[in-house]
Amino acid sequence: MQTIRVALSAAVATAVAVPLTLAAPLTTGIAGATVASPTLVYAADIDRDGLAGLYRATVADPTNKTAVLADNDAISVEEALLSPDGSRIAVLYDSTAANPSDTGARKLVTMNLDGSNQHVLATESVIFSSTEATFDDVNGFGWKGNDTIVYGWSTTKFSSASNPVFTDQVRTVPAIGGTSAMVAGTSGYADPAVSPDGTQLVAVNYGDHTGTTDLEVFPSTGISATPPVLATSTTELRSPAWSTDGTAIVFVRDDSTDTLDASELDVTRFDSGTSTWGTATAAVPVVQGADSSWLDEDPYWTDANTLMFERIDDSSTASGDGVAPIDLWTAAFDTGTSTWGTAAKVADTPTVDEGSPSTAPADLTPPSAISFGAFGLGGTSVTLHWTASDADYSHVTLHRTDDTAGSPAVDIPNVFGTSYVDKNLVVGHNYTYTADTFDGAGNQAISEASHQVTATYAPKIVAPSPSSSVTPYAAFRVTWGVAGQPAGTTYDVDYAVKGGTTWTLGTATHLVRGSTATNGVITGTPGQTYYIRAASHDTFGNTTITPWTSVNVPYDQKNGLFSSGWVTASNRVFWLGSIAYTGTNGTIFIISPTSKSVSIVGTKCPSCGKFAVYVDGHYRGTFSSAASTTKLRQILWTGVNTTISRHQIKLVAVLTRGQRLNIDGVADPR
């Protein structure tokens, strides 16, 4: 049977009167202070095909409903619960018809009041093998605060060789999805409900499913001592629910194998004087009556002394389509006589098929407008960033105006999260963005804040070239600007080196700050690797930044050992003023830097040949230095070792007649 699980926060305690005539706005206990009617969610099978949709209304006007998940044959809602603050719904439903690729399993999800922003928390499954069938089911769930879901997880295994094997657990999972975890000591428990303050759980102890069923209370952190037993049944106890003040628990008791015809609502109350739970007594005994109706599942409290529950109408006057309607009823506890009054049908209640309503305080408060942060620049795209100040923030609709071209505004609706990449912009144009903010209840805040941005290219570190202006053989020029940048674009450029036993990046040095320059000179140290990073800014304070890019300043090859057959040539065009070359096959060059990574720098050319590399005596491979044109100061090979220590690097020339090998230096990133 499909059922809507329900729970009320303590904040609703004074919001619902008894009986529920629903004819006038509900009020608080303060004279003249009118408050909104609590939100109501319920499943309704509008087209009477046995598949229920999910609808939202208010207790004051339940017939004026809005579809959350419309009854369009695409879904089948089983259970739903509002969060304590009334801003989110936890729903167990099947979406097979809407998604044919779905396995058909029911999913426990959370969503906004309009059905958006869904997060899957658990998925039921059915697995068949040649010898066994396994069923995983969600067995009851509830909100623990507004951020956590507590649910029962039951596994049943059927095999041809044995009786069914049952495994029951109470689990928790973040309301936005994530890894679930069993509540400590709850093996054998299911169908949980959470106390209003979130500290206690009541759940059904099924044991091994062969004896009695107990209803027990224990801390929400897990069972550390034998829990008190609130009720015991030889058949079934189910659907517990806490009163809004946490002092009473109602549940369904079935003491007959015919659960439809012999159900009753029992209530147990907590005695603060003795710190014990009292004996459960019948609050609403419902045996199939003269109107041919009976009690269905999932009672809940509208205040500390008032219950709402379902009765199924199976009379001969019911709809002839075979799907009996379900009506909502109430019953109130008279604290003066300590007795329960006669149950009464709620007036003007909409037909609720296979489920009862769930209420919580209505969220009618508009959210705070978002706050824009600096945007990320990317040429024809801009990455928007903003901060949401409200916990129930849901999404925004963005509005973009091209200030340069004077084009009409462009709307970008239903953007979830707190960032968005807007594409197909024009570099050099100024754009203004505003946003309408929505919370989970659909309330809207129109943003008075706006943020401007110029579509600006991201900077790019260009391959360094030697500089003759400062210390010619160790200085190099770095370029970071991009052609076509809008006027007013400025740059920050930093460089740093790695070192230490962990080979981490050290303190950065500022090369330029807020400059319109697009290149600069770094005076390097031979044998050092420099890491360079550039950020560009538009005139509105938006920015983008490159990752760290490494540049090697080589050791002079003179620090190495050469076999016979090598010749040294001097020229200012070479790094550090000289280069070593050989045209003899088998000649050797050895250098032993203390480092983790090493780069061999040399010349590539049409007549340049190959070389074999050995690191600490181990062959690393044979590499080519050939190129279609002559290129100086090229990285011929880079190797990475497992440790930062002294390593021997040996190069062996592998040349044919007329070929040569040119070694300019060795980059040693110490």
Image (cartoon, rainbow, N blue to C red):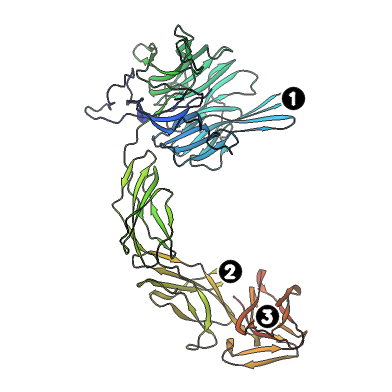
Q: Which residue is mark 3?
A: 625
**Label 2 to label 1: alpha-carbon separation:** 62 Å
Task: From this view, report whether residue 382 is shown above or below residue 612.
Answer: above
Q: Residue 307: horizontal and vertical position, in percent?
A: 40, 19
- SS assignment at label 1: loop
Task: From this view, report whether residue 585 is shown above or below residue 412.
Answer: below
Question: In the rendered structure, which amino acid carries the disc numbered 1?
Answer: Ser
Question: In the rendered structure, which amino acid carries the disc numbered 3?
Answer: Ser
Is residue 9 in sight in this rendering? no
Q: Which residue is mark 2?
A: 503
Q: Can you say which quadrant of the picture contains the C terminus?
A: bottom right
Question: In the rendered structure, which amino acid carries the disc numbered 2?
Answer: Trp
Q: Residue 138: horizontal and vertical position, in percent?
A: 56, 31
Asked whether disc 1 touches disc 3, contact meaning CB atoms under 8 Å apart, the reply is no
Task: From this view, report whether residue 584 is shown above or below residue 649.
Answer: below
Q: Is residue 449 left or right of residue 596?
A: left
**Label 1 to label 3: alpha-carbon separation:** 71 Å
Q: Which label sits on residue 160?
A: 1
The 10 Å Cα crowd at callout 1, few under 14, some 14 to 19, many 20 or more, is few
Q: Residue at x 76, y 25 (%)?
A: 161
Q: Residue 365: horizontal and vertical position, in percent?
A: 31, 39
Asked whether disc 2 touches disc 3, contact meaning CB atoms under 8 Å apart, the reply is no
Q: Nearer the viewer, residue 56 or 611?
A: 56
- SS assignment at label 3: loop
Q: Residue at x 65, y 85 (%)?
A: 557
Q: Residue 430: horizontal and vertical position, in percent?
A: 34, 64
Q: Is residue 29 left or right of residue 643?
A: left
Q: Can you say which quadrant of the picture contains the N terminus?
A: top right
Q: Is residue 247 left or right of residue 216?
A: left
